[in-house]
Amino acid sequence: MEQVKKKKIKKEKRKEEIKKNEKRHWINNFVIRERCVGKLTKDTAEFYYKSYKFTLKEWLSYGVLYFVLVTIIGYLFYNSIWFSGIMILFLFPYYKLVQKKETEKRLEKLKLEFKDALTVLTASLHTGYAIENAFREAYTELNLLHGEHALIVQEFDYMLKQMHVSRTVEEVVEEFAIRSGLEDIQNFSQVFSMANRSGGKLISIMDAAAETISQKIEVEREILVMIQGKKLEQRIMSIVPIAMIAYLRLGNGEFMKVLYESFVGQVVMSGCLIGYIASLWLGEKIMAIKV
């Protein structure tokens, strides 16, 4: 019995490895193909939504903002600007944190725009367009609705260019789902592939899928709107401790002098700073509700 179980476990592991290798092989081929046509460069960095690339202006602006913040904290908690020199060690973790936030914002924006794209695409199919022409019509409508700089408009433009070089619609949509990393788009990709193969039932299947996905995105959006108020309260409360220390520091410097000049005072202020950072981290964790 034990040998049979071991054989089953080995077979399952082999199947999982084969699936992983097939997925890696498919993605590698996609990357190689994109490089061969000169697509995986600066021109299409924006089409890879799971990572956010800073522009030079953003690198500089976020860096300046970081040094301003740590200089203020150093002045309020230690009465010294040397604190900013020590905090330079945490500059790149700060960049990573900002990059993560920007990626989340970008994905949320793409998800909302994708909901509109589904509505426009199904409407185009109802008017009698073939699937390729429906994508072209949807691109035109989305351009009018969101503008040419919108994520979904640029994505549809990119997909149409891929179709123009003899790529199938299914391949293009599947690659979009992989690049986005969004569950809703991946679900749509799977449904679309099955619906496109079924032929006659394409419109009815697309209607049902579009309605289900749109309702899910709308519910998620409503929940996020309800949370926004609490997030705003949390941000306001996070400013209060800094504002109180700044008031005491500027209004009555002698009162705070003992905390800056004595060893015990510096330990107390360090404890306050650690507690403040921990409260910010805890507040972000509580507010980071996954819908």
Image (cartoon, rainbow, N blue to C red):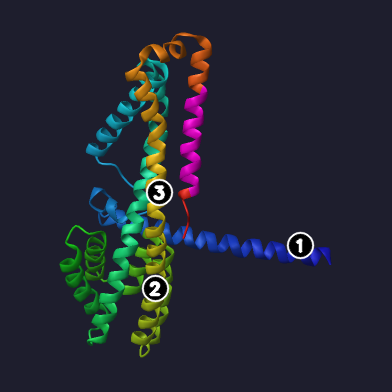
Q: Which quadrant of the figure contains the N terminus? A: bottom right
Residue 80 placed where, x, y %?
A: 37, 15
Which residue in the structure is indicated by mark 1? 6
Which residue in the structure is indicated by mark 2? 215
Please give the label number shown on residue 110. none
Q: Nearer the observer, disc 1 or disc 3?
A: 3
Front residue of this view, candidates 33 and 162: 162
Q: Residues within 10 Å of mark 3 (few under 14, many from 20)?
A: some
Residue 124 placed where, x, y %?
A: 23, 81
Q: Amino acid at mark 1?
A: Lys
Say what secondary structure mark 2 lies in.
helix
Mark 3–mark 2 Cα distance, whole angstroms, equals 24 Å
Q: Determine if residue 133 is in view.
A: yes
What residue appears at the point 79 percent right and 67 percent down from the top-left corner?
4
What residue appears at the point 22 percent right and 37 percent down from the top-left corner?
57
Which residue in the structure is indicated by mark 3? 231
Front residue of this view, candidates 218 and 76: 76
